[in-house]
Image: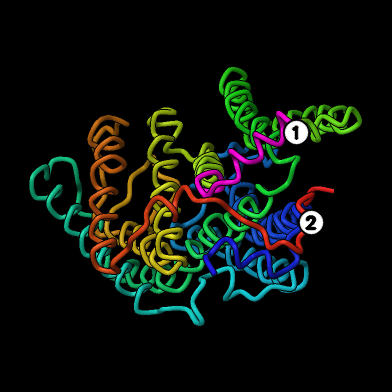
Amino acid sequence: MDFIKQAFNFKHEFWRYLVGSLIIAVFASLGQIPFTVAAILKYVANGGSAYNMDEKQLMTILEPNLNLFLLLLSFAIGFIGLIIAVKYLHKQTLLSVTTARNKIDWKRVMFSFLFWGVISSGMILIDYLTTPESYVWNFELERFLILAVIAVLLIPIQTSLEEYIFRGYLMQGFGTVTTSNQFPFGFIFTLLSIPICSNIIMIYDLDVWEGIGAIGAVIGVGALIFDILKKKNAFESEFNKNLVTYLRKKWVPLLITSVIFGGMHVFNPEVGKLGYGVMVYYIGTGVFLGVLTLMDDGMELALGFHAANNLFGALLVTADWTVLQTHSVLKDVSEPGAGFGDVIIPVFVVFPILLFIFAKVYKWTNWKEKLFGNIEAPLKENSNLLD
């Protein structure tokens, strides 16, 4: 049984994934309380007013190592929410969200981690040697050792939670819901609402909470339209049935989870500094990690890659405009840009090469079926999953 199809063996009504996502978000928000309280207290102690504190001040007021620890703590708490949702809401095992194999293949995790860790570190080293004027030496042994302990312990939790949510939990969730006769509406509405929400946020320069409110309002409009269509039996039409047949493909959950993954980074300071063109990189990374998961019938390679990408990056280089400020070895002082080398080469050159290498190592075949094949629910399943 493949990675997505095995989710049909558990409680998989789509409302469970909505509630489960809310549970994870609530736990992650609770995990942010220590960071928020510590930052506000420090800001007030320095003579500032909590009412005048902006997001940049919130993210930079604390000492970098403490800042990193408290930020990553929220992911550890969020992981508890994920486990609760999977175990109690879906009656599912964490193993089945991780892989289609009988057990997690830790050799795959370590291979991907070390492989990308060496390559990404080498790329940083080459860039440092060829353009030394773009960097300053930032190494302080005591602070770096503290950073290393925090990063090694908590960054894999952060990256793993993101992988479990997007390449595991939601990949299976959107995969099972494609068999519903109400899915085409949700899919089309999502595709339309993403640019609508993005434009609203950009035009009116909304902060995080205002942006969430705008997204909530758009979702509310969608719910009203859905109710009208349901009352008119639009989901039973021949046209809708044809749409269900066309969209019941593996590329659909791959695309949706990748776009959502990219969208989750829209409030990162990198986007503010580099512009919205950098979203191509975030979404492209989501597609790459999703392809790894579907082709390999498990998240192990994606788990290792993502952990290596964030861990080695946090230890080796930082910049004033990145989401995490760390006591890394180097500090990038160059003027950033979301150009050819920063977006196009990673997404359209590096990632395809990496997929080719992984395909050779693990002897992947049948790419068409793995990425574009049908998602078939067992006959005993009721396809109307949104009721």
State the residue in front, 321 or 211.
Answer: 211
Image quarter hosting the N terminus: bottom right
Instruction: Let me know if residue 198 is in the magenta part.
Output: no
Query: Does 295 sit left or right of 168 as displayed?
Result: left
Q: Which residue carries the number 1 mark?
A: 219
Q: Residue at x 51, y 72 (%)?
A: 100
In magenta, the rendered stretch is 238-254
Q: Which residue carries the number 2 mark?
A: 382
Main SS, magenta residues: helix
Query: Does 130 sit left or right of 357 as displayed?
Result: left
State the residue in front, 325 or 187.
Answer: 187
Q: Above or below — where is 349 with respect to 108?
A: above
Q: Above or below — where is 18 with respect to 267?
A: below
Q: Residue at x 48, y 60 (%)?
A: 68
Please rate how many residues cluster around mark 1, counting C-alpha atoms within 10 Å: few if below 14, some from 14 to 19, many from 20: some
- Which quarter of the picture shows residue 248? top right
Does residue 56 appear in this view? no
Q: Percent position (x, y) of residue 148?
A: 36, 70
Hey, which residue is sitting farthest top in the picture?
A: 203
Q: Percent position (x, y) of residue 98?
A: 53, 70
Q: Nearer the viewer, mark 2 or mark 1?
A: 2
Query: Does 265 sit left or right of 173 as displayed?
Result: left
Identify the amino acid type marked 2. Answer: Asn
